[in-house]
Every structure is written in C-alpha cells, then in structure tokens.
Image (cartoon, rainbow, N blue to C red):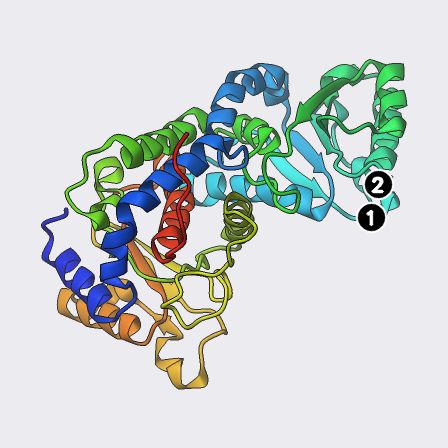
Amino acid sequence: MRNNPLFRQDMRLVLDAGILDWSLFLRNYAKAGQALRFYSKYNQKFSCFPYLWKKFHECEENNSHFKKFRTILVVGRTEDLAGIQCIVGWVQTFIGKHHQSFPEIYFIAHPDPELFWEMIGTLDSECTGIVIICSNPNDLFPYIILLRYLEFLKSSKCCVTQHVMIWIPKGIDFPCIRSVVQTFSLNVHHYSMITPKSSFCFNEISLSIGNLIGFHFNLFLEGAKTTCQQYFHHSLKSPLEGAALYTTLKQQYPTLSHWVWNTTQSFQPLAQWIQWIWKDVLPPQQNICFPKHISHSPFFSLGFTTTFWEKKNITDVFFPSYLKSSDTQYTKIHLKQLLEQEFKTTCKNLTENNHAVRIFYVKQLNEEILGALIAHFLLETTLLFLMEEDNTFPSPI
C-alpha cells in the first residue's frame, strides 16, 4: 500500500500545505521517540492497555454467568455510562455482532428512581441482570436503584447474588452500598481510576460488559499491543512511516492535522477520552495545544472526520456545523460516488482549505484494527506534540 500513487500524492499535499515543519520534524524525531517511549512506559494513565491485558481474563471469569440473561440494565451517572455506550455502539454498528444470542443492554442514568420502578415491572426478573456503577460516595442514585431492584428480585424469588453486579472504584468507601452488600452478600468488583473520571471508555467495566455482547477485548488489546511494539521496535525507513500503521494494519494513511469522529455519536466519548488521556500524559508545564504551526485553537475544537474505504466502497462524509458558511460545498460529500481523479481532487481541496480530513483505507473494521487505531491515536498525538516543541526531552530511564 505504501507504493500506492494516491498515498504519494497525499503526502505531497501534507508537505506543501505546511501542516508540519519538516525540518523541525526531522530534527526532533529521534529524541521525541525516546520521550514517547519514556512517557508510555512510566506514566500509569498511558499504561492502560497493558493494565487491561492483565485484567482481561479476570473480568471474563467474573461475569460469565451474566451471559445467560436476555436483558442487562447498566446504571450510573451519564459520564460513567459514556464509555460503555461507546463500546456497545461499536459492537452493534461497526462490528456487526448484534444478535439474539447476546443480551440486550439498556442504560439508566435518570435521577428519578420512580421512573426505574415503573420500567422494572415490565421485565422478566429471571432473564434480567443489573450492573450498578458507583463513582461518587455522595451520589445516592445508584443506592436507591439497588434497593428498588433488590425489592423487585425479592418479590420474584430470584437469586440476588446471580442477578446483581456492583462496580466500585478502588480505595473509595461507599458506606450505604457497603451495608447492602454485606446484608445480601452481593458481588462487588473494583475498578481502577487509570482513565479520566469524566470518560470511562476502556476500563474494567466496559471490558466486562463488552465481553457479554461479543466484543473480543483480547483482539482489541492485541491490536493495541502490536501497535506499541511497532512504534518502539520496528526499524523505520522514514519518520512518516513511523507515524503510520503500515506494518500493523497494512492500510494507506495520509497524515493530516486535526481529527473529527462524526460517523456516529458513539465516537464522541472516545474523542473526549483521548483528549483527557493526552492531557494527563504530558507534563503539566507544557502548553496543551496541537502542533504550533496549526492556526486552530486546542485539539478537539474541530474534532476529526474519518472515512472508511472497504474495497473501494467509501462511506459518506458529513461535516458538522463548525464549518464557515463559505464552505457549504463541503457540508455533505458522497465520496463513494466519485471517480478516482475526482476523489484525489476532493482530498486536495479539503486539505488546502484546512478542513482536517483524515481518510483511512481499511479492508474490514474489527476489534484488532480498532485497538490498533486507539493506541495509535494516543502515540501519534504525543509524538507530534513533542516533535513540534524545542523543549528539552526527558532521558529514558
């Protein structure tokens, strides 16, 4: 794929557009790579993928009995549910594994417990399990829902311990929940706050629930692991190959500036999660902005648009409302209807207008590719930031 003429053309566009300061890019590439290796190895938040790899089999064993249920209720605050909703959306929309053999997932974040009480009466208690996520000891909503559900199970004479799963952050005490757990001998699992509190996208909870509906986290984590290994161990022929995923995904990858996920709302929690991880990974004294040669303000003010091309079937691109009125010609583009030359011209126009278009050529999107993409986004964001800075880089330990 790296010999594809379209790739060569896009790389020329990148350089001509001045998106990267090429001399600074080359000068900082080696030391930035060392710094990136240092960050990813010794920063706990960046080490979420190795951590989840260790946790995978444990989570798989702890929730295996939930696979028998037809319905699973997931209760928590809106920010607690965002990452899980993202995983469920990927499984059902992109991975295509929504099937009758997997449980239906419903999310409850409404502050009114009476609404839950009305809904619960329509469910089959024997075929329903509940997952309660606790993140704030002062929030009584999970506690009230737990009491209501226990009352519901008691009236149906179901085994309480088999139908309830509670998640509590490590090191934080929930007195109200603890008393109920002790009384009913409920199963409690602990999750680590290795990802920002505002977006639980890939932690033990989403890993556990994703496993229930057919999301292969072992493949997801393997893809992420392979990507990291490629960055740190592969002999690169040029810096831009290092910023790409050829050796991992065998895909064509023109590197541009900003990123926007708007193919589905399921990607919005992911963008937020990556942004928070990126901020937490870098030292606090460094200015949080994308490469200084980009005139736009911080990282996700524009987001990024992604188009997947599967055997020349290109999905449509929909640009969000942030574009200026003069750019209405690009509000909706049907790339799959374009001929090859028109496609090249469109990419060139979008690049010249600095619309932050990034196009991936993926034969088939699966868990392994998704994991590789996520890991790559984390790596590349930090790498590009470091390469655009003339600061002193930390020496690897």
Q: Quadrant of residue 80?
A: top right
**326 lies above or below 109:** below
Residue 370 visible in the shown view:
no
Q: Residue at x 58, y 42 (%)?
A: 83
- Quick check: marks 1 and 2 in contact, CB under 8 Å? yes
The image quarter in which residue 38 lies: top left
Residue tagged 2: 141
**Residue 253 at x, y = what percent?**
25, 52
**For residue 224, above or below residue 251:** above
Please provide percent x and percent y for residue 179. 90, 21
* Lateral position of residue 200 relative to residue 292, left or right: right
Give me the residue at 11% from left, 52% from top. Answer: 4
Q: Earlier in the sequence, mark 1 or mark 2?
A: 1
Q: Is residue 307 visible?
A: yes
Q: CA distance from mark 1 to mark 2?
A: 6 Å
Q: Which residue is mark 1?
A: 111
Task: Give me the disc on residue 129.
Answer: none
